Amino acid sequence: MFRGWNEIFAEGKRAEATQRLKALGFSEASVARLFEVYRGGAWLGGVWGELIGRLSSASAPERATTRLHDLLLHHALEIGEIPPRRFVDLIVPLLAGSSKAYLHLQRHPDALLRAWRADPSRPLRREAMEAACAPIAAAEDFETLCRALRRYRREIFFRIALRDLSVGADIRETMGELSDLADVLLATAVRGCMRLLGVPAPPVVLALGKLGGRELNFSSDIDLLFLYDASSPEGASPVRRQGIYARLCETVVRALQQPTEEGFCFRVDLDLRPDGRNGPLVNSISAALTYYENWGATWERVALLKARPVAGDLAGGTRALAAFEPFIYRKYLDYTVISDLAEMKGKIERKLAQRRNGFDLKLSRGGIREIEFIVHALQLLHA
């Protein structure tokens, strides 16, 4: 069907091209853009029919065509090294599917070339991320640390998006790579902030929620729980220790989520800590355990189901989770869990009913959140 496109465009047969392209769903504006792309992108002539075929079958043909036109109009030199057929395979799904990836390419057009050189079909290795981020933790000041974290996050986010949209990576691979990136950036931020603040002993940082379960997506925030060992640093009073780690926690959060000219790394949510927003930002492990044993609520048991150590003192994090386990998984059957979860689900449904926006895939009856509540109840009762 797409044979002859190169000849039609090369001979300037605009009327014929317009008629055929309109039949494929392209607007007159897109036809004009394609002629401009053809005139300025002679290196694509050999795959012109494939390009039009990919554009017409893309999830958003008009959007992809407009973005391709704008990208090649201004940045053809930065991406002309990529073999034409490979360029078409990579660029069309990306431009049709991701506004953020397109904006990244506008600002950093050589990102596609770097991703191609690194072989986008190859999974990203956590060890490579850790090696790349090691120098970032040694940043000379907070602003340099923030800038380096954001630049690395942006580059790797783009590569993960390219693998997801254009290579067809498995969703579990994509979530795993995003989670690895968050783990590595968080650990780097903790080390960098510890050094800048002169904190001698690392905190325990637990990931909860999607990051805890290694289920992060491109728009997820990260749920974190900051703890510390009540015996370190040596010689400090309990109040002094709490102050040291509260300041470290606040600094790490700013390093990750504070907006700058480079954007941000991740939005951070600390609301799942003991006693939620009413509790201190950081707790000693022993204080958290005392709280859970005496006042811990069902929602706090649920919050710890996916918890895993991700930064700071990893061995301390493993010990903390072992200490919390009797709180999470009760020795005897506790059917109040079911009524508590039903009440939590009811609150969500009542808020949702006020919106009257139709079906919500995540929050409506039968949606993702309801499935999660059922699984959580089974875990708490039988795990």
Image: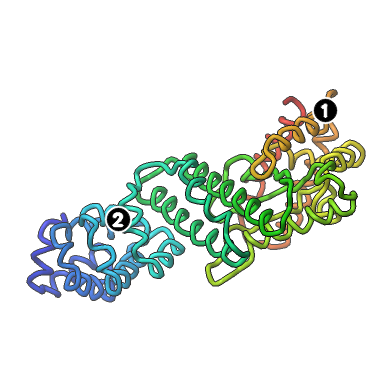
Element class at badge 2: loop
Identify which residue, 258 or 29, lies in the foreground: 258
Residue 254 position, x and y percent, is 67, 62
Check disc 2 and give the amino acid type: Ser
Q: Which residue is mark 2?
A: 57
- Neighbourhood count class around disc 2 (C-alpha, 10 Å): few under 14, some 14–19, many 20 upward: few
Task: Name the side, left or right, on which 136 lies relative to 315.
Answer: left
Identify which residue, 135 or 4, lies in the foreground: 135
Residue at point 52% right, 48% down? 178
- Neighbourhood count class around disc 1 (C-alpha, 10 Å): few under 14, some 14–19, many 20 upward: some
Identify which residue, 18 or 315, lies in the foreground: 315
Residue that lies at the very extreme toward the front in this rendered image: 235
Residue 120 position, x and y percent, is 35, 48
Asked whether disc 2 touches disc 1, contact meaning CB atoms under 8 Å apart, the reply is no
Q: Which residue is mark 1?
A: 330
Residue at point 26% right, 68% down? 76
Q: Quick one: quadrant of the N terminus?
A: bottom left
Check disc 1 and give the amino acid type: Arg
